[in-house]
Image (cartoon, rainbow, N blue to C red):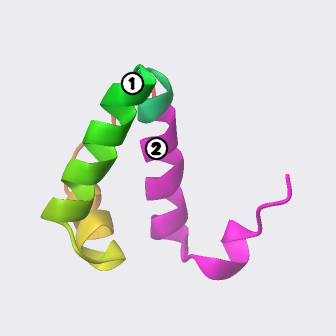
């Protein structure tokens, strides 16, 4: 693809972004927006979001 996220993000951030995208693809668009807004409110920084997902066990569909 045209994304060069591997140059912008560390390995854990990249894994987190991939997992979030996969989960969101399973939701209808309005729910995707709600989930994203909730995550942005709960975790004001990338480090906070990545740290929270690192502590959460991976799901079988990830």
Residue at point 54%, 63% (across, down)? 14
Query: Would residue 14 be found to the left or right of residue 40 on screen?
Result: right
Q: Are marks 2 and 1 in contact (CB under 8 Å)?
A: no
Note whether 55 is above or below 11 in the view shown. above
Pointer 1 residue = 60
Query: Would residue 42 be found to the left or right of residue 30 on screen?
Result: left
Name the disc covering residue 7, or none.
Answer: none
Residue at point 35%, 74% (across, down)? 46
Residue 21 among those drawn in magenta: yes
Q: Position of residue 31 (x, y in %)?
A: 31, 28
- Observer-nearest of 14 and 32: 32
Q: Position of residue 59 (x, y in %)?
A: 33, 30
Pointer 2 residue = 19
Q: Position of residue 25 (x, y in %)?
A: 50, 27
Query: Would residue 19 be found to the left or right of residue 38 on screen?
Result: right
Magenta residues, as a range?
1-22
- Observer-nearest of 31 and 2: 31
Mark 2 or 1: the one toward you: 2
Rendered image quadrant of residue 9: bottom right
* Callout 1 secondary element: loop
Residue at point 50%, 41% (across, down)? 21
């Amino acid at each position: 693809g045209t994304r060069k996220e591997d140059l912008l993000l560390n390995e854990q951030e990249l894994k987190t972004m991939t997992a979030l995208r996969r989960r969101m693809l399973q939701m209808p668009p309005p729910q995707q927006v709600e989930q994203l807004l909730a995550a942005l409110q709960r975790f004001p920084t990338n480090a906070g979001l990545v740290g929270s997902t690192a502590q959460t066990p991976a799901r079988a569909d990830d």
